[in-house]
Image (tube, rainbow, N blue to C red):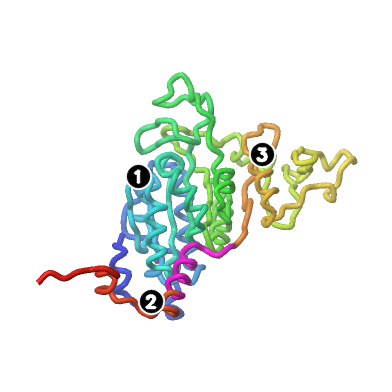
Amino acid sequence: MKTILDAKVEKPHIGTIKYEPKDFKPDVDVRWCAGCGDFSILSPVQRLMPELGIPKEKIVFVSGIGCSGRFPYYMDTYGFHGIHGRAIAIASGLKIARPDLSVWVATGDGDNMSIGGNHFIHGCRRNVDMNVMMFNNEVYSLTKGQYSPTSLTGQITKSSPLGVLDDPFNPVELALGSGAGFVARAFDKDRKHIQYVLEQAAKHKGFAFIEIYSNCVIYNDGAFEDFTRKDIRDERTVNLEHGKPLVFGKNREMGIKLDGFKPTVVSLEDGKHSVDDLLVHDETDTTLAFILSNMTFNPKLPRPVGIFQAIERTPYDQRVTDQINHEIETKGEGKIQELLKGKNFWQIN
């Protein structure tokens, strides 16, 4: 992992270099546990980077603390391993100072939703142009298995031997409520889908949040098996595709219909309903995004994966740049000595 300060030394090679996934794989050992879901996130990211057409010296990965914190070491780009919960704060400052960079954040459910929760909601609100990948394993893994803000009620962990009493955060719902323009969900057992969602996030101008379910084989193994296992995922998940009806099932024999604002499952084989009756996904419909996010913990409904919302508005870093340029255009370049002296000063000889 290089330091970001070095990014100003190397010259970009736009249009002169074509990358392959191997170009983003540093010569280091990946030190996650065997079978960790994080491997299934790393691989799609390394495959995606060459497709973006961005020089390596213009790409930065920022992380906090946790298993996800190692991510910058496993990408042959610039990187910054921050402190607990501060990845988005660091990334925000970096993007504002260097708006030409493609900024990515790797964080976990504990790092991002607990100690980093305040930075997260304000990152969403400010709409800083960055891509936040949250590895959600519903437990603290690096610190040996304590319950996290996304752990389920009743979950047995090292710090909740009688079961978790808290209600969990719904990260997608929190991101939507905090103002994130791009909000999506994927899971580790579908690498192709992860890469697609991340590619769409990279194209989005503004704050992009992607919740990725990542199985922890040591402290919370099988947390997502009820809807990600290959033999049942078609029945237990529904893929959100813009402009398409919500159809699911092994034979695509079921669908989601709205009863008022309440989503319900209907059969497409009983002769009572057809595809024309189903809810059609619209990434620009903010009300619909909340309705779909509320399906997350409902055992009677399939769990939504894909892009919930994709709405663009002027990013915060662009607003800062525009404001500075406006001041320079209207008042001219500032002088540091005049700024330090201010309007009222005296000189001592």
What residue is shown at x 31% (from left), y 72% (from top)? 8
Nearer the observer, 180 or 163: 180
Q: Secondary structure at mark 2?
A: loop
Q: Is residue 277 visible?
A: yes
Residue located beneath label 1 in the image: 84
Provide the residue span drawn in magenta.
313-326
Nearer the observer, 35 or 314: 314
Nearer the observer, 209 or 46: 209
Q: Is residue 340 visible?
A: no
Give the vertical position of 284 relative to 303 (above or below).
below
Q: Secondary structure at mark 3?
A: loop
What residue is shown at x 40% (from left), y 66% (from top)? 23
Q: Secondary structure at mark 1?
A: loop
Q: Is residue 317 magenta?
A: yes
- Label 3 amino acid? Met
First in residue order: circle 2 vs circle 3: 2
User: How many labels sit on residues?
Assistant: 3
- Which residue appears farthest toward the left when viewing the image? 349
- Label 2 amino acid? Pro
Q: Is residue 110 magenta?
A: no
Give the vertical position of 263 relative to 41 (above or below).
above
| Residue 22, percent from left and from top | 41, 64
Residue located beneath label 2 in the image: 12
- Which residue appears farthest toward the top when viewing the image? 162
- Label 1 amino acid? His
What residue is shown at x 46% (from left), y 80% (from top)? 15
First in residue order: circle 3 vs circle 1: 1
For disc 2, the neighbor class at 10 Å (few under 14, some 14 to 19, many from 20) is some
Magenta span dominant secondary structure = helix
Horizontal arrangement in the rendering, residue 12 relative to residue 341 (left or right): right
Residue located beneath label 3 in the image: 295
Horizontal arrangement in the rendering, residue 225 relative to residue 42 (left or right): right
